[in-house]
Amino acid sequence: MRIGIVGVGFSEFRIHEEPFYNVAFLAAKRALEDAGIERGEVDSFILGGYDNLGVGRTISNMYTAPAAGAYLRHEIRVSDDALFALPLAFMKVKSGSEITMLLAFGHSSETPIELVELQSLDPFFHRPFNLSLPVFFAMQSYAYRERYGVKEEKIAEVVVRMREKGAKNPRAYIREKVSVEDVLSSEVVSSPLRRLEMAEWCDGCVAFILAEETVARRLSDSPVWVSGLGWSAENYYFDRSLHDLPFVAKSAEMAFKMSGKERKDVEALEISDLTADYYCMILEALGFAETGRGWEFNGDVNFSGGALCTNAYGSTGAFLLASIVERIRKGEIECGMAQSMSGYAQKSCVAILEG
């Protein structure tokens, strides 16, 4: 039995002043309209987005479940980047649900993310070092650049390419082009990372309607099939190599094995480039670029502008996934891959989609 995506709904990606559940409602409503169904036809709901240790909000599904239309219905929350909720939604349909909604929510403007994320660290060995996400990202950037002799100009060129793509995407949060000089002259947030080399937080929600094959073909002339899924978690502690991302490689291999696809079959990638260095490291871990030379890969990567242009903490992976879905539906590509990760470079999820 194949599982297809038959509806997608977006909110705007920006800094929202209204409550996040109103933003989530808008995405859910648009996904239902896109699929041509009513709320009552959805028999299960999967909610994806950060909770206590991500944004400091307890029991987020008390707000997002009603926004999705899940009141008095089967509902599960995945407290992580929303791409990690896709395998659960997939399995839910596999186990008997005819139509499932996956609602991804991200509303980082409410919370000092770096401060809250510290609470997820070991309180005795890690938290006292004040290892916020930017600091840890910088540690990995330094390790990667030093290990492979990557010049900062090459990293800056990645930012320029992503900004050019984001400028063409009306859904992107950041749509301003920059030059290499702009990147290299931007302030250092945590050495060696500069402000323009890191993704900015924003708010936004995405919803998907998934259906089993018979229903999917009835609802849509062009369902997008979920053909492969993979996920992996790395060691919690930091006594691991910081110059590479082995957990990304493991999640990719799992997805390739499930889908029966090879790398040459994947026409487009959407990856979670929370920093420009991660752009390189992820491409290398996925097996699309030579180790230490991810910056020179010239394939179809982050047509949306990637996380460097749109990073709604909690729904970033869903935004990347939706970009692949839309391109397949438009006939621009036949097969694509979305990848996202979370934590202190600890977890990765990969989805392979085809038309």
Image: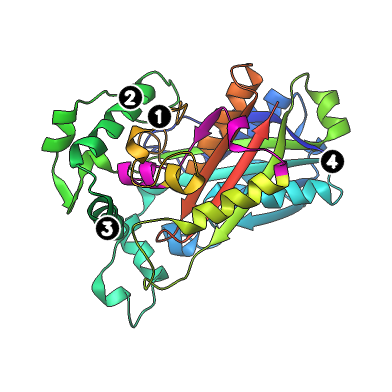
Mark number displayed over residue 305: 1
Residue assigned mark 3: 143
- N-terminal-most mark, 2 or 3: 3
- N-terminal-most mark, 2 or 1: 2
Residue type at mark 2 is Arg
Where residue 316 appears, as percent x and y from the top left, is 47, 42
Residue type at mark 1 is Gly
Residue assigned mark 2: 175
Residue assigned mark 4: 98
* Between 274 and 337, the one nearer to me in the picture: 337
User: In the picture provided, is 303 more to the left or to the right than 36?
Assistant: left
Residue type at mark 3 is Ala
Stretch in magenta: 259-281
Spatial separation of the CA atoms under disc 1 and disc 3: 25 Å
Mark number displayed over residue 168: none
Where residue 231 appears, as percent x and y from the top left, is 60, 55
Spatial separation of the CA atoms under disc 2 and disc 1: 9 Å
